[in-house]
Amino acid sequence: PLHPRAEAHGKVIVLGEHAVVYGYPAVAAGLPQGIVLEASPRSDPRLPITLTIPAWDLDLELHPGSDHPVARACLEVLAHCDGPVTGWAIRGSSALPPRAGLGSSAALTVALARLVYGPGASLDDVVAASLAGERVFHGEPSGLDSRVAAQGGVLRYVRGEPPRQIRPGAPLPLCIIPSGIPRSTADQVARCRSRLEHLPSVVRPVLIAVGQAVESGIHAIEHGDLDTLGVLFDVAHGLLGALDVSSPALDRMAADARAAGARGAKLTGAGCGGCLLALAGDAPESLTAAFPSLRPLFVEVAAS
Ligand code: MEV
């Protein structure tokens, strides 16, 4: 049987996306906006499991032969957890935009694993189950999204190592600006890989520099040095462009955010769409005014 209710966080990658796939560190923050799943038994236990998330326009039956990636990912999670294969209705509510680089798929797969395992499940078990689903979306997930969706907080993450909790020395005034452009994480990870394979001697140092920006960024976060963190956002955005994962639209948005007083701005997540992440300056309202149609989301990340 499934437990009646489970939750997971959204996430925003502060620094280190893409390089984290190759074993370099990243730092990410859990978002209070996440997902809540509720499960109830269907009238006949032989009926297929349904998944309905109105906020994401999702209304699916989880059939073994389904070619819908979300259905396939959910079935992988349920199989990993030895969960039920039929007989349940699962309903989700979420304030996260889907496919925007804010960890919607990891939040879904983490919450689904928790419906099976229950509230006492270990973080490692939940993350392992979530990863079984995340592999449907792209073949080589670093695990960062699943870890932050399960654990929340601000984490330094290196693939295969236990994450370290980071305590911000001052609240981080983050502003997440959705570009409204959908993108595929799998395609973006493939673009980065193809550039690395084409020009390894040039692109490997870029990945190393992203990792260095993460270490310097963590130092700045812990010491409340927002000005240095802002500069690192700008540097990271340039490095991500060199990895072929930015886009003219994101480059323009980053320039507009800086012109509107942000301390720095970068793409966050897979890139080429998704969201821009700005570190707000002293007048965060100017960022809302600079992107009137995109509805920026402000999140103040403080020591938990
Ligand atoms: C996607 O949110 C983050 C990437 O670094 C991929 C991953 O970590 O698996 C692009």
Image (cartoon, rainbow, N blue to C red):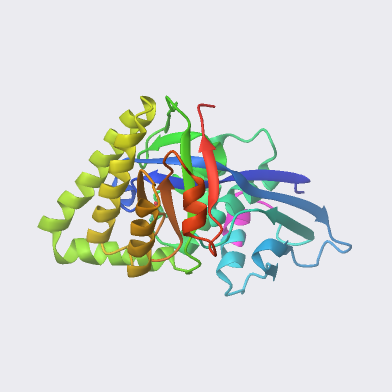
Asked if residue 125 shows in the view, the reply is no
Quadrant containing the C terminus is: top right
Which quarter of the figure has residue 164?
A: top left
Ligand 1, by image quadrant, is bottom left
Relative vertical location of residue 251 with respect to residue 118 in this rendering, above or below:
below
Q: Position of residue 75 (x, y in %)?
A: 61, 61
Question: Which stretch did the figure color magenta?
Answer: 75-83
Q: Nearer the viewer, residue 132 or 149?
A: 149
Question: Does the stretch in magenta take in 104?
Answer: no
* Residue plotted at (65% across, 53% down): 95
Q: Position of residue 131 (x, y in %)?
A: 49, 51
Asked if residue 93 shows in the view, the reply is yes
Q: Position of residue 176 (x, y in %)?
A: 49, 51
Relative vertical location of residue 5 with respect to residue 135 in this rendering, above or below:
above
What secondary structure do most residues of the magenta stretch adopt? helix
Relative vertical location of residue 61 with respect to residue 106 in this rendering, above or below:
below
Question: Does the stretch in magenta take in 80?
Answer: yes
Instruction: Tell which residue pokes out farthest to the left in this image.
Output: 201
